[in-house]
Every structure is written in structure tokens, then in C-alpha cells.
Image (cartoon, helix red, strand yellow):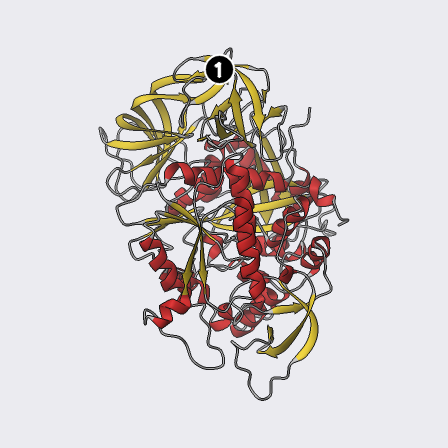
Amino acid sequence: MDNQAYQNMELLRFTTAGSVDDGKSTLIGRLLYDSKSIHQDQYEAIEASSLRKGETEVNLALLTDGLKAEREQGITIDVAYRYFSTPRRKFIIADTPGHIQYTRNMVTGASTANVALILVDARNGVVEQTRRHAIIASLLQIPHLVICINKMDLVDYGEEVYETIKEDFSSFSSKLDINDLTFIPISALKGDNVVDKSMRMDWYGGTTLMYYLENVHISSDHNFIDPRFPVQYVVRPNTDDFHDYRGYAGRVAGGVMKKGDRVVVLPSGFTSTIKKIDTYDGEIEHAHPPMSVTMLLEDEIDVSRGDMIVRENNQPEVTQDLELMVCWFNEKALQLKGKYRILHTTQEARCIVKEVRYRLDINTLHRDMEDKNIEMNEIARIVIRTTKPLFADAYRKNRITGSVILVDEGTNETVAAGMVI
Amino acid sequence: MNYHLNHLKELEAESIFILREVAAQFENPVLMFSGGKDSILMVYLAQKAFYPGRIPFPLLHVDTGHNFPETIEFRDRLVERIGARLIVGSVQTAIDTGMVTEEKGYNASRNGLQTAVLLDELEKGKFDAALGGARRDEEKARAKERFFSHRDEFGQWDPKNQRPELWNLFNGKKQFGEHFRVFPISNWTELDVWQYLAMEKVELPSLYFAHERKCFWRDGVLLADTPVIPRKPEEKVQDMMVRCRTIGDMTCTGVFPSKATTVEGIIEEVATTRITERGGRADDKRSETAMEDRKKQGYF
């Protein structure tokens, strides 16, 4: 890489989901290894470990081995983050286990992903777990979905196997909300179509997985349409140089905000004009997601953390009544009429669960209106009322202003993730 | 119009967001400062986050008494320049007062003693959030660390009981007596850190650049020759051009033969190097799960 080329690299976050057997760890190991993100001491460690276990080849899957507790039990208990980069992009993998009891981990990994990577074992085709992963990817509105049909080496690299799985999945996924769907036949073990194009699948005209990850169009994954600026922190230096400075620090959650824009501050409803968009590196003309900036307004109005600066002619819904799709995270089941703390952008309130509309079966999409008991790892549509108005958009429109978490008031644990409908 | 941020600017925006979240959600945060490049980066990002105001929390340095003199000089200059408040927790004092017991032998290190002093300082200062410069790419136990890492009243980390983190929503709620460790640069890799420091032209301690130093080999790690590490008879000192990849206590920070005298030189070296950063840390070599075990006890 020449000296300054890294200043043009982009960041892509993707999530991988799969079970112990479908080759997910091998695939991640392969991506790390082939992109030369593995260091000699790491490689020697897994080489020694492979030998100890009596394996003939170096087991790349061992690269993603986690904690002692997990190694002892041979399972993955949590989301692990992995990193690699190529000259074009830096990648963050949220590596999550695929079993049903880990739905909450998948949801967590999916919440910030640009791309979801789902592995299908070519010998088994589309199974319950594949459907579950796809449903979660669609619920969490991951912009791009890739189905890697793995272990092609075990089905003689047959085109028919690939086509059948592709058809199966497509007929199922037509019921889902998926915008961008790609299928890639691979062998993570042998390296086919992961980084290098396979010589054994001439019939496949598409790209390798790495090429896909390096080139998939992600610059429209943020909302650049609806300006939203949740105020995070008020900067008041009170120094001689900056005596009257009052800046509203935050991260742009949507749209493009420019100096001179007419804005309204929620919930007060006061209007003003953006006087300056400030950063440590100097004033800038406009700000957009996911930038962290400091906003200064022309008028002296009372603005504090939890307020939201928006455009006069483009405002979120200001409401105390919200319909949410929630994924339940806690061992203690959802309590109907129960009260929880709710975190939304930089706002915080309390809420009561007024109604459970239905429980969603994440294997079949069936809406269960009878059994509305919502346990850990289950997904449900609920209605809540908050103690004060939130400034929310539909999750479909904006993943930042459309998402909430619920917190147990006794234990302080995060008990649910919610998406505004 | 192009609304594109490069990966370094996106990481910067994320870290600034976390730093501001800590200032907003906690009453009494503190930034753990080791003198290494990661904590220098943290201080730099904190300056950005609260500009033009000062950093609204103090820096805490746990000094083992075995630091490279360059580290301490650099620390003091930095603190003065940015007008920050510095708290120093002294391992030497803790040994002198009998709070901790010093290890003996050739591989004695005060690294483990830092944990007790750190926890003591956090308690004394009634800090409810301690910001650290740990990264998830450093070590496998850290790959599962949260941005907001919840610790019980003993400062312990329970890997099975961490709060899920989604979107931009960070739950810093806690019971009385509990606190959080917060890691704003979790998503940065070693290479990202160097690229960013180069892009932003951030000043760094001289130890990171190749310099002549008396060194010797022990267990495959090159160590600086200093009075605080007793040498075995067969360990021979030689003059070498070396630099540090991490900066910590002299007893466990390895140095590397290097010719990199500029940040760009370091980037090239990091991009092509074959050993991980912590490969030179004797403290991690003690066992396969050394880091996981230390984390559970409250280290970082």
C-alpha cells in the first residue's frame, strides 16, 4: 500500500451467523488468513494446537477460538469481534453463534451491520437455522444479505446443488423485507471463491466473497434524507477565549445539516438557525451520519441532552405511544403491564408495556396471538406508552432514530432491543 | 456531494461518541493513562470530543516505578500542555505500605500489582467509570469485551454476564458501588491507530521510534537492559537499534529490532510484520489464558 492510500479506505461491518458445523469458523479463519491478517505467533499457536489434537492440516477455525470457558465446552457464548483489512476496506466482523438460544447475540451483531453473511451447508440446503438468520437479518434491516453456499467441495462443486438451494431460499425470502440478496458458492476449507476465484466452478459467473465485500455499495446505507441531530452533551468551556460558547455535541443520526439551515429543537419547538458546525479540526460546512460534531445555534434557547435538532419541514414523530418489534434478552420474561426504563437516541424515559400483539415464530414467521408469554430470545410485537414524548422514526426509515433498548429498573440489565414500527 | 468518511474518520466519530456518552452518563469518570500510544490516542480523541472545552475528567496513571523515564517525561509534558488533572497511583508506595507484595526472581514483574493499585485508586477517587485504551484486536479475551464493560463491586469482569450493546445505545446504569470500564477505541486495530496518529500528526514518545539501546534476549523476547531486571549469567547484553511496539512496565515490555524512525516507517513495519503486538509482552506469555484470568480479577 503506498503511503497515503489508507486515507481512502472505507469501513464495512458485517455479521456472520452459523452453527458449529457449517464451517463459519473456517470461513472467518480463511478470510483472516488469506488477507494476511494472521500474525506468525497466532499461526504458530493454532498450528501447535492442531497437532496436539492430531489433525493433519492447520485448522484455521481455531483462529476464532474464544475464552477458556468456551473452549472447554466447545461453544461460543457471545458476540466476538474480528478485524481484517484489505487495501480497499477495513472490515469488522461480528461473529455470532447460530443456535436458537443465541438469537439475542445475532440481533446484537446485526444491529450495526452493513452486510449479513449466512452460511448454508451445501449438503443440507436451507434449514431452519438458515431461515431464522434470514428473518433476523430482515427484521434488523441489514442492507445487504449474502448467502454463502459452503462445502461445495463435498458435493463435487455441482451447479445443480447451488441452483436448488438458491431457488429454495429465494422462494422463502420473498416473504421477507430483503433489498439486496447475493448467492456465492464457496468452499471455506479449500478456499474456493473466498479470496481466489475457484477453478472448479466454471459455471458460476459471479464474484468471490472477498470481491463482494470489497465492492458492495455501502455509501447509501445511512439515511442522508431526514436531518436528525440528537443532542448528546452540551459543551460550555467558560474560559476567557470561549466565554459565551454554547455548543451542542452529538452524532448526526440522519440527513445532511448545513450552516444556515432553519431548525427546530424538540421537544421545546423553538426555532433557530445553525450558526456554526464546529469540530476540533475547525468549522465545517455540513455534517452527515455518522459524524460526531458540535452544533451552534443563532439564538439563545434552552437545549440539553436528549433534545433533538431537526429541520422545520421534516420532523420525526413526537409520541408517547409506540409500537415495537422487540427481541427479548433476559431470563426474566417480559412482564405485561410491567414498567421498564427505555433508552432512545440520547433520551431516556420510563415506559409501560400496554399490550403484546403477537409472538413471532422466528423459524416460520407465524404470528402467535394465543401464547403471548415472551421469554428470552423470542421476538414479539408490543405496544408501549412512555412517560414523556420520544422523537422517533420508523426503524425502516432510520436505524438510529428508530431503535430503543429496554432496561430493567431493578437489575439495570438490558432486557430487550426494540424497533419502532 | 460525497458523504463518505474514511475508515479512520469513522472510527474517530465512534470513539468521540463513546467519550461524550461517558461524560454525560457518569458522575465521576477517569481516563486510565499508561503513557502508551493507545492512551495518547485516547487523550487526543477526548480533546476532540470536548473541544473547545477541556477534558471534563482527570487522567489516572498507575506508575509501577519501573517505567521508562521517557514515558514519565512525555506524560508530564502532555498533561501540562492540555491542562488536564493527573492522578498518579504508585505501586512503589503500595509495596512500601505492605498493601501488595513484590514478586521475586528473574521474571518478577510489577504488572500484576497494578490491578490492586488501580482498584484502590478507583475506590479512593469514587470513580464510577474508568476509560481505557484497550482494543479488541489485541487478545482473544478482549475480542468479546464491550464498549461499556460492567464491573461488580470487586471490579471483576464476568464474561457471561455482559450487557448486549446494540446500535448507538449504551446502558451505563449501575447499582451503588459498581462501576464501568469503558473502551472507546475497541474497534481500532494496531494499524488503524498508527495510520490515524500519522494522519493527524500526533506527537509520540521517542520510545516508539528506532533508537540505540542495550538489550538482551530472554525466552524469545528482547528486553531492555535496566537495573530493574536482574540478568541471568548467560544473558549477554548487546547494542541494538530497537523500538517499542507497546509501552508498559520495563520488566515486561519487549523491544523489537527496527529501523523505523518515522510514523510512516512504523506503519509499513506494522503492515508487514509477522508477530502480534502483544507477542512481546511477557505478561501474556505466562499462560494461554493469562489475559482472561487477569481481566476477571479486574485488570483493565
Q: Is residue A351 visible?
A: yes
Image coordinates of residue A220 in percent, x first then y, are 61, 28
Relative to A176, residue B178 above or below: below
| Closer to us: A41 or B240 | B240
Q: Amino acid at mark 1?
A: Asp
Residue drawn at (41%, 13%), measured in percent from left and top? A269
Residue farthest to the bottom? B233
Image coordinates of residue B245 in percent, x first then y, are 61, 62
Residue drawn at (62%, 68%), measured in percent from left and top? B255
Relative to A39, residue A250 above or below: above
Q: Answer left or right for A254 relative to A107.
A: right
Image coordinates of residue A357 in percent, x first then y, are 31, 25
Say few, some or many: other residues with alpha carbon within 10 Å of mark 1 (under 14 / 14 to 19 / 20 or more): few
Quadrant location, the C terminus of chain A: top left
Query: What SS does tag 1 mark?
Result: loop
Q: Quadrant of residue A73?
A: bottom left
| Closer to us: A3 or B223 | B223
Q: Answer left or right for B100 relative to A260.
A: left
Q: Is residue A396 visible?
A: no
| Closer to us: A187 or A302 | A302
Residue farthest to the right? A2
Q: How many marks?
A: 1
Residue farthest to the left? A337
Disc 1 marks which residue? A299
Relative to A409, residue A82 above or below: below
Task: Read off the chain for label 1.
Answer: A
| Closer to us: B64 or B41 | B64
Image coordinates of residue B170 in percent, x first then y, are 41, 39
